[in-house]
């Protein structure tokens, strides 16, 4: 009995057998279903979402600023402060971008940035005919403030901003400044912590 042949000279039965065992056909036979494919996609998307969410939680949970750098907490001892008095001259603490203002009513950590347009103001020991006392003066547009950060003159819309201060006393108690303009007594203080990550907005004078 004659055996049918296909182009190329192979018997038809051999060609059929070869086609049946082709890798392409095997792959198709073993391929995933539509439901399995969608399940894999859903699982991969869920894993990606959980990974991103976990990263965000870690980012916000961990402190982003170390103590002793701007944005973090600076701890000082009372001997670092200027002598307290109504006319006390503040001292610039450059690393924290604030002024150490130790006046007759307590301590403040006053932001170095003017509340007008963000210039860095300076301390002037020379008064003016209009304001005959030492005070902060902004070199950009002339805004002026007292050693407590209170607005005196110029285009600034409010008092100077401050940073949150917590004073721990020798008896173990503590007290904090929680609003702009507030001061904290430093008599019998053991440590003074200034949190430059928490700004207290100065009071508007308008």
Image: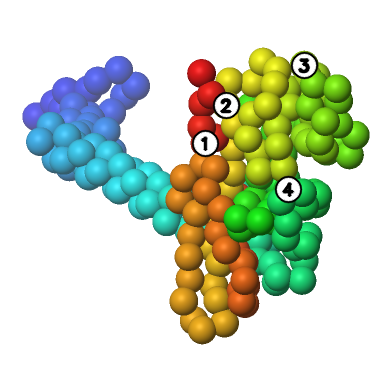
Image spot of residue 197 (x, y percent): 56, 48
Question: Looking at the image, is mark 1 or mark 3 earlier in the sequence?
Answer: 3
Residue under circle 4? 99
The CA distance from mark 1 to mark 3 is 20 Å
Give the numbered dot on residue 158: 2
Image height of 114 relative to 194, above or below = above
Q: Residues within 10 Å of mark 3 (few under 14, many from 20)?
A: some
Residue under circle 1? 201
Image spot of residue 31 (x, y percent): 19, 38
Image height of 9 relative to 107, above or below = above
Question: Looking at the image, is mark 4 or mark 3 earlier in the sequence?
Answer: 4
The CA distance from mark 3 to mark 2 is 14 Å
- At 68% from the left and 54% from the top, the residue drawn is 103
Question: Looking at the image, is mark 3 or mark 2 earlier in the sequence?
Answer: 3
Residue under circle 3? 141
The CA distance from mark 2 to mark 4 is 17 Å
Q: Nearer the viewer, mark 1 or mark 2?
A: 2
Q: In the depicted view, which residue is nearer to us: 176 or 103?
A: 103
The reply to whether residue 142 is in sight is yes
Mark 1 lies on a secondary structure that is loop
Colouring used for the render: rainbow
Mark 3 lies on a secondary structure that is loop
Question: Looking at the image, is mark 1 or mark 2 earlier in the sequence?
Answer: 2
The CA distance from mark 1 to mark 2 is 9 Å
Question: Viewed as shown, does residue 76 lie left or right of 171?
Answer: right
Circles 1 and 2, Cβ within 8 Å, touching? The answer is yes
Question: Looking at the image, is mark 4 or mark 1 earlier in the sequence?
Answer: 4
- At 13% from the left and 26% from the top, the residue drawn is 2
The reply to whether residue 66 is in sight is no
């Amino acid at each position: 009995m004659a055996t049918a042949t296909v182009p190329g000279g192979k018997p038809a039965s051999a060609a059929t057998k070869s086609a049946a065992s082709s890798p392409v056909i095997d792959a198709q036979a073993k391929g995933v279903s539509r439901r399995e494919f969608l399940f894999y996609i859903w699982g991969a998307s869920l894993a990606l979402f959980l990974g991103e969410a976990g990263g965000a939680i870690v980012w916000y949970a961990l402190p982003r600023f170390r103590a002793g750098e701007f944005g973090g907490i600076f701890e000082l001892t009372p001997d670092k402060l200027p002598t307290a008095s109504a006319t006390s001259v503040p001292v610039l603490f450059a690393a924290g971008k604030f002024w150490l203002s130790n006046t007759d009513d307590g301590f403040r950590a006053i932001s170095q940035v003017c509340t007008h347009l963000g210039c860095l103001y300076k301390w002037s020991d020379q008064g003016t005919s209009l304001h005959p006392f030492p005070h902060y003066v902004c070199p950009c547009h002339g805004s002026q403030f007292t050693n407590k950060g209170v607005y005196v003159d110029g285009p600034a819309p409010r008092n100077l901003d401050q940073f949150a201060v917590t004073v721990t006393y020798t008896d173990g108690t503590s007290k904090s400044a929680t609003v702009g303009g507030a001061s904290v007594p430093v008599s019998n203080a053991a440590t003074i912590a200034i949190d430059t990550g928490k700004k207290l907005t100065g009071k508007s004078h308008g």
